[in-house]
Image (cartoon, helix red, strand yellow):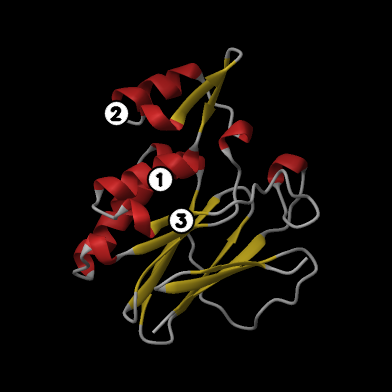
Amino acid sequence: MGNIEYKGESLAVTTFVKGSRLPGTVNLAEPFLVVAGKKASVAIASNDEVPVFFAVKGTLVGAAKVTLEDGVEEEFAKRFHAAITQYGLRPETIEVYVGPCLTFSHTHVERALLERLMDRGYRAACKRTDGVDFLDLPLLLLMQMRREGVKMANIHIGDYDTFENPELLHSKLRGDTENNLSVANLIA
């Protein structure tokens, strides 16, 4: 199988699968990076964390590697808001792509955490099945971006779970130590 590709109106993202030839030099987002310019690109080296890419067509591209803690504590939301403010962006023009990561069925959390998140308005991201509590971190991030004014139609969540695709992607949950590299390029 080839690499995992996403191409939108504002950005193109490639996640290099196991055994792929990686690109040369990239700007790594650790944990958050915004690059402006017509040929801007950014990259995320992640494992089970959530790689988030955002762009405004022809202007800038940004990336964040979001851990469970960063999502729950709204660190990503704070950095995203700061980027919108710093660059004078109109949220309705931002396009977002959420790359391969753990899906909710592999993100077990304590009930107390879900209760705190539900109290903060994130009920949709909180799941419970057969007495086991889960958090849908990509959905939590989507909700945070929607609160900033990003249009639902502009947020794209990828189809790949890092744990469920051992032939393609690395996963800490499976015991892998290597990272998955995703590279985003701004579309002019």
- Residue 111 position in % (x across, y down): 48, 17
Q: Are marks 3 and 1 in contact (CB under 8 Å)?
A: no
* Three-letter code, disc 1: Leu
User: Which one is earlier in the sequence, the residue at label 3 or at label 1?
Assistant: 1
Classify mark 1: helix, strand or loop. helix
Q: Residue at x 60, y 54 (%)?
A: 100
Q: Residue at x 69, y 68 (%)?
A: 3
Res. 175 image quadrant: top right
Quarter holding the C terminus? bottom left
Q: State the residue lying farthest toward the front.
A: 153
Mark 3–mark 1 distance (CA, rounded to whole Å): 11 Å
Q: Residue at x 32, y 55 (%)?
A: 79
Q: Residue at x 56, y 78 (%)?
A: 26
Question: Mark 2 — residue?
Answer: 120
Classify mark 2: helix, strand or loop. loop
Question: Mark 3 — residue?
Answer: 156
Which one is closest to the eye, mark 3 or mark 2? 3
Question: Mark 1 — residue?
Answer: 141
Q: Nearer the viewer, residue 155 or 118?
A: 155
